[in-house]
Image (tube, helix red, strand yellow):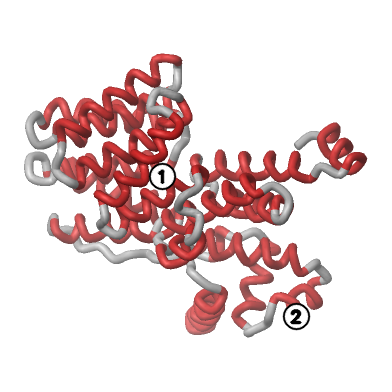
Amino acid sequence: MGARDRGFTEQYGCPFLYAECRILYGIVLLATGQWAKAETALLAGLELARGSVPTLNRLAVAAIAELRLLQGRLDEADRLVAGLEDHAQAAAVTARLHLAHGRPAAAGAVVRRQLAAIGPDRLDSSSLVELLAESLLAQGDSDGATAQAQRLIDLSSGGSDVIRARGERLLGRAVAATDLDLARAHLDAALVAFVRLEMRYDAAQTRMILAQTLRDSVPEVSIAEARAALAAFEDLGAGRGADSAAALLRALGVRVGRVGTRGSSALTKREQEIFLLLGEGMSNPDIAARLVLSRKTVEHHVASILAKLGLSSRSAAAAEAVRGAMTDRAQN
């Protein structure tokens, strides 16, 4: 938000303008793999939208739930969207949670209901079309998934590289059982696009699909793609993706250990200070008093630490800080 927007907000009391700006920015950061910054922006937007604009509130909550899902924190994501399932802003993440829990028919029902409400041929329906295709693939309907993938390709004719890349990825998955070379061509095209667009999670996810597709026919390439996916998932803090990549590598005969959380070197200087204080068992108010910060600022820093380290709670962060301190003492 620029100075003009801030001035308008201060003069006329319209915080929802800043809230919408923060939330949309957070969604962009989420898509490009900048998850710690995304969480900070989304939490700020949620705070501003709370009690004023319900649609923005739901949009922020749904985006945070999406982040938790990507991090592998499904229980938290489930709790966040509880009660929002019938709202448009939470339809996509609700469907993704159904898929993550192995309920593809339920995911398809959510998506079809929302597509019926908004129409399937709008650019903003592309994520729902993709989810519909994923639910069909999970139910063994490759023809239906192919049709939805082609719909995405058609939607991308207006110049959306993101939508086209997702369509290419779906086509690759849909034809993998019948035409391996064609599947690989579609998946390679999707991967090139996601890398160019700097969509790190989507690129890693596409590498995993390539690794799974080529597992039996070209195991050497499968191993290389799975290794690249594992590194990317761990760097992002995407626990479920990293576990899947590690499992595939082990199935391919590769000895691999999960790095787990990223090192504290990924934290800023201020986050490192707070991380160490968490290890001392200090509460947010105590940390705020020690460092002369507001409680809200400390909350944002703690959220950023959890996102960067791929941890599910402050108690897990405290345990990690203690383990790190013990390791440092042992090495010294």
Q: What element does badge 1 sit on?
A: helix
- Residue depicted at x 63% and y 67%: 302
Q: Earlier in the sequence, mark 2 or mark 1?
A: 1
Question: Which circle marks residue 201 in the picture?
Answer: 1
In the rendered structure, the answer to whether residue 37 lies left or right of residue 106 reads right
* Residue 15 falls in image quadrant: top right
Residue farthest to the right, as pictured: 11
In the rendered structure, the answer to whether residue 182 lies left or right of residue 116 reads left
Characterize the local packing of mark 1: few (<14), some (14-19) or many (20 or more) Cα atoms within 10 angstroms: many
In the rendered structure, the answer to whether residue 190 lies left or right of residue 199 reads left
Q: Which residue is mark 2?
A: 286
Of residues 82 and 124, the one nearer the viewer is 82
The amino acid beneath tag 1 is Tyr
- Residue depicted at x 29% and y 26%: 189
* Residue 40 falls in image quadrant: bottom right
- Asked if one can make out residue 294 in the rendered structure from this viewpoint, the answer is yes
The amino acid beneath tag 2 is Asp
Q: Is residue 59 shown above or below 173?
A: below
